[in-house]
Image (cartoon, rainbow, N blue to C red):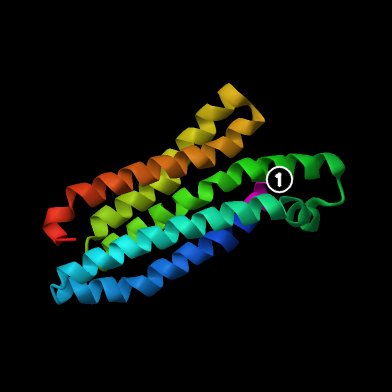
Amino acid sequence: MAAYGVMMYVSMIFSATFIGYSIGAAPVIAYHDGARNHDELKGLLKKSLRLLGVSGIVMVTAAQLLAVPLAQIFVGYDKELMDLTVSGFRIFAIAFPFMGFAIFGSGFFTALNDGLTSALISFLRTLVFQVSAVLLLPIIWEIDGIWISIVVAEVMAVVFTAVFLIVKRKKYHY
């Protein structure tokens, strides 16, 4: 489906920001973990979560405002397809704040040398939750279920990321 393809292309631009931040923060996280600077690690985690929250809200706002121009670039040749893309993108964009937390959570555990937790977050986020949601939610909400499925998958990934952060807090002293 062309509308879904457009959303995937555009979402890669938005998610690249979160991926870049996670990759950039990883050496700092690893350093403070290795040096046992637990207060610095805790502060970095809190600041990162705040920054990701604000960035996610900015991205949702930008996506809502830019939905029409972005859709026009890709599918401006077909009014019906453009309307579907704009409508879907506005729903899909709600996933951006959650996406940032899940991506960072996976990167955070990678930096702590906990590859299993990192891989589990990524696997659940991209395969289990997205595939399950894409298969189930269109049954309930038809075409909107496809767009909502990404939001639901990202929310579920954040829930699991939060659980891992809470459960592993004592082990890593953050």
Q: Secondary structure at mark 1?
A: helix
Q: Quadrant of residue 78?
A: top right
**What is the magenta segment's predominant secondary structure?**
helix
Q: Position of residue 137 (x, y in %)?
A: 54, 28
Q: Is residue 10 left or right of residue 76?
A: left
Quadrant of the image containing the N terminus: top right
Q: Amino acid at mark 1?
A: Ala
Q: Is residue 39 above or below residue 127?
A: below
Q: Nearer the viewer, residue 29 or 78?
A: 29
At a point 24% along the width and 48% down the height, the residue shown is 164
Question: Dividing the image into 4 quarters, which one contains the C terminus?
Answer: bottom left
x and y percentages locating residue 44 in the rendered image: 29, 67
Is residue 144 highlighted in magenta? no
Count of all numbered marks drawn on residues in the image: 1
Q: Which residues are magenta?
A: 1-8
Residue sitting at 50 percent across and 60 percent down? 55
Residue 6: in magenta span? yes
* In-image side of 28 versus 171 (left or right): right
Identify residue for label 1: 3
Q: Residues within 10 Å of mark 1 (few under 14, many from 20)?
A: some
**Residue 112 in view in this figure:** no
Residue at the limit of the structure toward the top, as seen here? 140
Which residue is pictured at 60% across the width and 39% down the height? 147
Residue at the image point whose x is 30% and y is 50% from the top: 120
Residue 68 picture location, percent across and down: 76, 51
148 with respect to 86 (left or right): left
Residue 154 at least partly seen:
yes
Q: Is residue 49 above or below residue 89?
A: below
From the viewer's perspective, tell me whether residue 84 is left or right of residue 39.
Answer: right
* Spot occupied by residue 114 in the image (x, y as percentages of width and height): 22, 60
